[in-house]
């Protein structure tokens, strides 16, 4: 692969391809703004018009990709001498193009209709704790998604094909072995923690916390982390999320009177996503070089800030005076705040409320079930029983209802099979990146204590953000850390952190 972009002229076909990509991206990023508005600002009555706008734009971007000149241009570029960056753009666009082109339009529309019906059924099933209401929709979606995978690659494991929608360049076998290592590390570690004698200050944040003050505190934390409010916003939504591009990337969070830590960690998590997006190169906007790598890499950025900074002792030493200024009733030390923030729950059924360790077992349960569903080894009707069986096996808890069990997540009603593993892969990658940055820069803990986040920010910018999709995932991690992507750093991180916390 050529690594000297200057030495290769920009062929006409390449220039035309970039023009097409910029148009497609303009449609997609307009869609993002409309979705953000729908979740944050839009009055409820706006739904019928918004649905129409979004589905029209989605068809339009699909048409631009599949029916325009993109396919021809990609073929033209096949035998052209291209620079390394140009080759990366062609590689990424080809992958998208092939996926979009192989699946019949009719099936895409069926999936879209089935998911909007499934969403309503899921909401109702969850409310009534009645899995039977959701089951036919789930069954329909599993069938459609298997067809979808079959169109893309009839030879491949259908789950691997679906996983590649979110992780296009990470082999499923590698993801699987990382998750397996997590399970083998975490199941005994959590069991040890449950029988440990250490008494953590688990109730250090008990009480009520005014939500306006919580919001002001979230803003202060974002300022502290150097979030650029000229290119961003903080708003409130039911489920925190981040949306945007390198010129305008917005975060949301949520506030709960009794849980000030939930809001803080959500805000910091979303900050990590936004900081990545804002760090993508401006001049590559609209092409793969100006777009994020994939979900595990995105999640590595949010988890790095949330867990390695936001949940650290050093961060609490920094934040405590600000926190107690905002909430004078809070009477706690930085150590107590650290312990409360990192406690491992004895009995928690809900993934989004999980601690840093049990979280991954929640993910592994979903991963195993969706693999079995897509692989045809598990019938939809048996999902609740399988769910409870795996919770018993890995976490030694029995969900009291399907609402608190297999009906808790929205993902399957969206037809998103293969998405869950990216959350855990992101945490694992975060640990590897943080360890490498730490080794290279030194003194990261002292920096956090001093509120000095620039060196870490620059390191991430240089090693991850500026590359967009220049490298495939494994290559990106190797370039950044000098090692293959693995669970080693994560295992070391949790063993050390929780060993100290629980005196193991
Ligand atoms: Zn995230």
Image: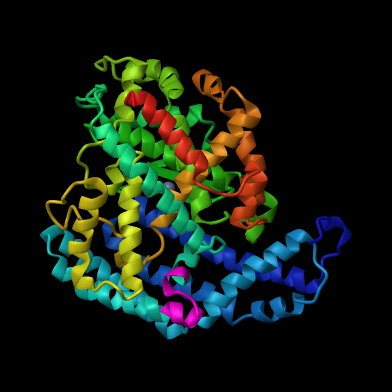
> In the picture shown, does residue 375 fall above or below 299?
below
Q: Is residue 366 left or right of residue 68?
A: left
Does residue 254 appear anywhere in the picture? no
Residue farthest along the right direction in this orientation: 7
Whether residue 402 sits left or right of residue 189 in the image: it is: left
Report x, y in % for residue 391: 23, 52
Whether residue 271 is situated above or below residue 79 in the rendered picture = above
**Measuring 52% from the left and 35% from the top, which residue is drawn there?**
227
Residue 474 image offset from top left, x and y in percent: 60, 54
Q: Dividing the picture into quarters, in which one does residue 379 lie?
A: bottom left
Q: Where is residue 53 shown, x and y percent of the image? A: 42, 69
Res. 335 in view = yes
Is 414 on the left or on the right of 317, as rendered? Answer: left
Colour mapping used in the image: rainbow
Query: For this rendering, which residue is in front, 48 or 29?
Result: 29
Total numbered labels = 0
Q: Quadrant of the C terminus?
A: top left
* Magenta stretch bounds: 148-160
| 154 in magenta | yes
Q: Quick one: quadrant of the N terminus? A: bottom right
Main secondary structure of the magenta stretch: helix
Left or right, 436 with reference to 161: right
Name the image quarter holding residue 11.
bottom right
- Which residue appears at 60% of the width and 34% of the height? 437
Is residue 454 a member of the stretch shown in magenta? no
Q: Residue at x 29, y 42 (%)?
A: 354
Q: Position of residue 128 (x, y in %)?
A: 11, 60
Foreground residue among 475 and 191: 191
| Camera-side residue of 21 and 407 | 407
Vertical arrangement, residue 481 with respect to residue 446, above or below? below
């Amino acid at each position: 692969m050529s690594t000297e972009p200057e030495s290769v002229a920009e062929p006409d076909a390449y220039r035309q391809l970039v023009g097409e990509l910029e148009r497609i991206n303009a449609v997609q990023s307009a869609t993002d703004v409309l979705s953000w508005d729908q979740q944050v600002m839009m009055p409820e009555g706006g739904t019928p018009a918004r649905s129409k706008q979004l589905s029209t734009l989605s068809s339009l971007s699909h048409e631009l990709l599949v029916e325009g000149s993109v396919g021809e241009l990609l073929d033209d570029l096949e035998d052209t001498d291209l620079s390394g960056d140009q080759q990366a753009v062609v590689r990424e666009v080809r992958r998208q193009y092939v996926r979009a082109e192989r699946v019949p339009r009719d099936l895409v529309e069926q999936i879209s209709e089935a998911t909007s019906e499934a969403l309503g059924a899921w909401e109702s099933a969850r409310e009534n704790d009645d899995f039977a209401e959701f089951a036919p929709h789930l069954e329909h979606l599993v069938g459609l998604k298997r067809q979808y995978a079959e169109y893309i690659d009839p030879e491949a494991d259908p789950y691997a094909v679906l996983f590649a929608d979110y992780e296009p360049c990470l082999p499923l076998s590698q993801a699987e072995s990382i998750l397996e290592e997590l399970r083998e590390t975490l199941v005994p570690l959590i069991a040890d923690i449950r029988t440990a004698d250490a008494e953590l200050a688990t109730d250090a944040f008990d009480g009520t916390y005014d939500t306006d003050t919580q919001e002001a505190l979230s803003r202060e934390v974002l300022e502290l982390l150097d979030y650029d409010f000229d290119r961003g916003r903080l708003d409130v939504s039911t489920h925190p999320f981040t949306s945007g591009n390198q010129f305008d990337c917005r975060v949301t969070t949520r506030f709960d009177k009794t849980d000030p830590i939930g809001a803080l960690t959500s805000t910091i998590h979303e900050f990590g996503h936004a900081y990545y997006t804002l760090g993508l190169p401006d001049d590559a906007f609209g092409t793969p070089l100006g777009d994020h790598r994939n979900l595990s890499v995105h999640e590595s950025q949010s988890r790095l800030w949330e867990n390695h900074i936001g949940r650290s002792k050093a961060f609490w030493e920094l934040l405590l005076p600000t926190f107690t200024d905002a909430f004078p009733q809070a009477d706690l030390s930085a150590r107590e705040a650290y312990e409360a923030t990192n406690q491992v729950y004895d009995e928690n059924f809900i993934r989004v409320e999980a601690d840093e360790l049990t979280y991954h077992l929640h993910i592994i349960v979903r991963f195993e079930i969706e693999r079995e569903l897509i692989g045809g080894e598990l019938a939809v009707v048996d999902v609740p029983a399988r769910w409870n069986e795996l919770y018993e096996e890995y976490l030694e808890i029995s969900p009291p209802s399907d609402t608190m069990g297999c009906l808790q997540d929205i993902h399957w009603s969206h037809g998103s099979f293969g998405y869950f593993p990216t959350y855990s892969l992101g945490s694992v990658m975060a640990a590897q990146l943080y360890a490498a940055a730490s080794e290279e820069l030194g003194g990261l803990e002292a920096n956090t204590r001093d509120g000095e986040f620039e060196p870490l920010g620059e390191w991430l910018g240089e090693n991850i953000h500026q590359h967009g999709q220049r490298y495939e995932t494994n290559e990106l991690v190797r370039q950044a850390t000098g090692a293959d992507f693995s669970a080693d750093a994560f295992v070391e991180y949790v063993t050390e952190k929780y060993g100290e916390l629980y005196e193991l």
